[in-house]
Image: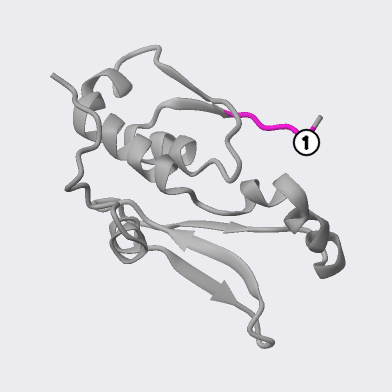
């Protein structure tokens, strides 16, 4: 039976979390982070997530609660790990669709598409 993440989870600290998804920061010549690269173990290519915004348009994203959608959260990786370990057969099934609500960067949904080939929808909205 599926169980919740235990205290011995590989996601207990930042370093193990980054290693699990092979998290890499992509920086420009001024050492500003312009993208991230994440890769689930066993996949053949990383997801490269970048922004199309100009530097001056990015600053407001880090004001208040907006910044929450600019990072990969431990909970997002833990959720995908749980799905991968406990529900992989369901996610590979015919006519399966995944809807990620409040996705932020949408990494779990993108992993569902990449790893399982699942039809996936990512949703988020600006603060109300």
Q: Residue pushed farthest bottom?
A: 29
Q: Magenta region's main secondary structure?
A: loop
Q: Closer to the camera, 86 or 62?
A: 62
- Counting from the top left corner in percent of width and height, residue 7 is at 20, 44
The quarter of the rendered structure image containing the N terminus is top left
Residue at position x 24%, y 36% in the image: 5
Q: Residue pushed farthest right?
A: 56
Q: Is residue 49 left or right of residue 1?
A: right
Q: Is residue 31 left or right of residue 79?
A: right
Q: Closer to the camera, 9 or 53?
A: 9
Residue at position x 73%, y 57% in the image: 62
Quarter of the image where one finds residue 89? top left
What's drawn in magenta, residue-wise? 122-127
- Counting from the top left corner in percent of width and height, residue 67 is at 68, 52
Q: How many marks?
A: 1
Q: Closer to the camera, 67 or 29?
A: 67
Quarter of the image where one finds residue 113? top left
- Counting from the top left corner in percent of width and height, residue 41 is at 26, 53
């Amino acid at each position: 039976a599926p169980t919740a993440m235990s205290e011995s989870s590989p996601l207990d600290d930042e370093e193990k979390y980054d290693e699990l998804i092979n998290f890499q920061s992509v920086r420009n010549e001024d050492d500003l982070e312009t993208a991230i690269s994440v890769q689930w173990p066993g996949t053949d290519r990383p997801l490269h997530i970048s922004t199309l915004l100009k530097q001056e348009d990015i600053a407001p994203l880090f004001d208040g609660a907006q910044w929450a959608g600019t990072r990969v959260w431990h909970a997002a990786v833990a959720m995908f790990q749980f799905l991968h370990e406990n529900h992989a057969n369901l996610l590979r099934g015919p006519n399966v669709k995944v809807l990620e609500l409040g996705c932020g960067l949408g990494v779990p949904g993108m992993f569902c598409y990449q790893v399982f080939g699942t039809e996936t929808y990512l949703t988020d909205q600006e603060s109300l």
